Image: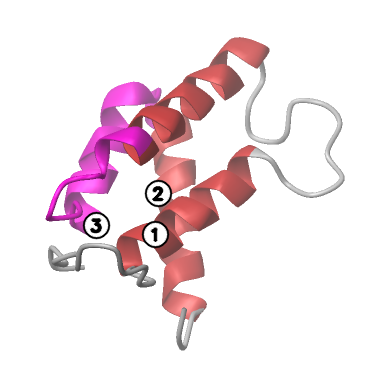
Amino acid sequence: MAGMLKQPGAFTITPHKVSLCILFKIYAPPGQFSVPFPFVSVAQHNRLGLFLLALTKSCDGILEPKLDELIHQLRLISQDWEASWLIDQLISRLSCLLSP
């Protein structure tokens, strides 16, 4: 995922936006009323939610982060097993897509 230039006032689907959608679906799966797998506590779940909120707010610049930058950020906010699981889920779901 190379850095994508944004056109002012135009909404385009980018690899970064698709990645965020996948992570949001992991964070809040449909029909889930308790803390979803693999999170064992509300604190772990909330940490991912705060990360996604901050990431969404910070992407108003001209260049969106590349996939390796997003993976690095996930490793920073997560425990080893949690980051590995999230990264595996993200990459496997991205590789299954034929188009956004």
Crowdedness of circle 1 by 10 Å Cα count: few (<14), some, many (20+)? Answer: some
- Say the numbered circle drawn on residue 67: 3
Kind of residue indicated by mark 2: Ile
Position in image of residue 21 (x %, y %): 51, 55
Position in image of residue 38 (x %, y %): 63, 34
- Look at the numbered disc 1 and give the secondary structure of its residue: helix
Q: Which residue is depicted at the point 49% across and 28% down?
A: 48
Q: Which residue is depicted at the point 46% across and 22% down?
A: 50
Q: Would you say residue 62 sits in the magenta stretch?
A: yes
Does residue 59 sit above or below 96 in this rendering? above
Q: Quadrant of residue 91?
A: bottom left
Q: Residue furthest bottom?
A: 98
Crowdedness of circle 3 by 10 Å Cα count: few (<14), some, many (20+)? Answer: some
Q: Quadrant of residue 99?
A: bottom left
Are circles 2 and 3 on residues that touch, CB within 8 Å? no
Does residue 40 sit above or below 2 in this rendering? above
Q: Which residue is depicted at the point 52% across and 27% down?
A: 49
- Say the numbered circle drawn on residue 17: 1
Looking at the image, residue 30 sits to the left or right of residue 96; the answer is right
Residue holding disc 2: 87
Q: Quadrant of residue 12?
A: bottom left
Does residue 51 sit above or below 55 in this rendering? above
Looking at the image, residue 62 sits to the left or right of residue 82; the answer is left
Mark with earlier residue (2, 1): 1
Q: Residue furthest front?
A: 9
- Please report the bounds of the magenta region as a residue range: 57-80
- Look at the numbered disc 2 and give the secondary structure of its residue: helix
- Look at the numbered disc 3 and give the secondary structure of its residue: helix
Kind of residue indicated by mark 1: Lys
* Alpha carbons under labels 2 and 3: distance apart: 10 Å
Mark with earlier residue (2, 3): 3
